Image (cartoon, rainbow, N blue to C red):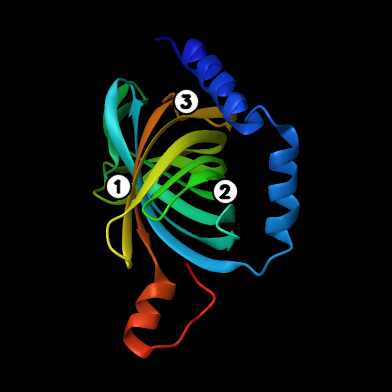
Amino acid sequence: MSSKSFTTFFIFFALCLFSKGQPHVFENEFKTSFNSKPKFEFKFDSRFSFLRNTNVKTTGIKIGLSFNKKFNVGLGFNRLFVNAKSEIINQADTIPVNLNYYYFSPYFEYVYFTSKKWEFNLSTQIGLGSAKYNFTNFEGKKDSKNRTTILSYEPAMLIDYKIIKWVGLGLGVGYRLVFYKNGEVKEHFSSPIYVIKLKVYLGSIVQSISGKQIPAE
């Protein structure tokens, strides 16, 4: 499936889920949820994507607020787990380099189905970050080149499963769409993404240890 076809299909599917056949339901859930007291949430995630036909992984952490277990908002930080190998031409010489990429990611999630163990949600995040090539120059010193600003949009469909009351696992699929790139890093960052995440239920952990309840998931 081409990138354009994948994106079109994903957007169509996401819009169908959001509408739920009853637009007023989403509107009512939105108003009710954001009038409730939020709870703190914390989670790790890994996002697998492709650069130059090579599978790479970004790891990240997310800290945010959950409103009525329906809407989650917050901020994440993501970076390449292992710098991807690449090469650049410098004064007619080919130099092996490591691609470094990191970004901050404000995120928004809508939980459209929930039960005691399962959560199905639609997630979107905006990536605000930078990429560059790291290498060792001819003098044996660490150097970097071609710093590039990258802005991206990442919608995803996620499924979370609560293994025990303290920890849950999540899987998902989505797409990273780069809509702004200012610099000389040559890699194409737009790509399908596959998500694996670990969700920590801090409220349950604190309650189990101390017997006290805190405003956290």
Measure the C-alpha gap from mark 2 to mark 1: 20 Å
Q: Position of residue 124 (x, y in %)?
A: 56, 40
Mark 2, secondary structure of its residue: strand
Between discs 2 and 3, the one toward the N terminus: 2
Mark 3 crowd level (few <14, some 14–19, many ≥20, 10 Å Cα): some
CB of mark 2 within 8 Å of CB of mark 3? no
Mark 3, secondary structure of its residue: loop
Determine the residue positioned at 40% across, 42% down. 159
Q: Nearer the viewer, residue 55 or 1?
A: 1
Q: Nearer the viewer, residue 207 or 152?
A: 207
Amino acid type, callout 2: Tyr
Determine the residue positioned at 55% across, 57% down. 69
CB of mark 2 within 8 Å of CB of mark 1? no
Amino acid type, callout 3: Ser
Determine the residue positioned at 28% across, 63% down. 164
Measure the C-alpha gap from mark 2 to mark 3: 18 Å
Q: Position of residue 168 (x, y in %)?
A: 33, 56
Determine the residue positioned at 27% across, 25% down. 54
Q: Which residue is mark 1?
A: 81
| Rendered view: 65 above or below 47 | below
As drawn, is 182 to the left or to the right of 164? right
Q: Nearer the viewer, residue 9 or 1?
A: 9
Q: Which residue is mark 3?
A: 190
Amino acid type, callout 1: Phe
| Rendered view: 156 above or below 206 | above
Measure the C-alpha gap from mark 3 to mark 1: 18 Å
Q: Which residue is mark 2?
A: 107
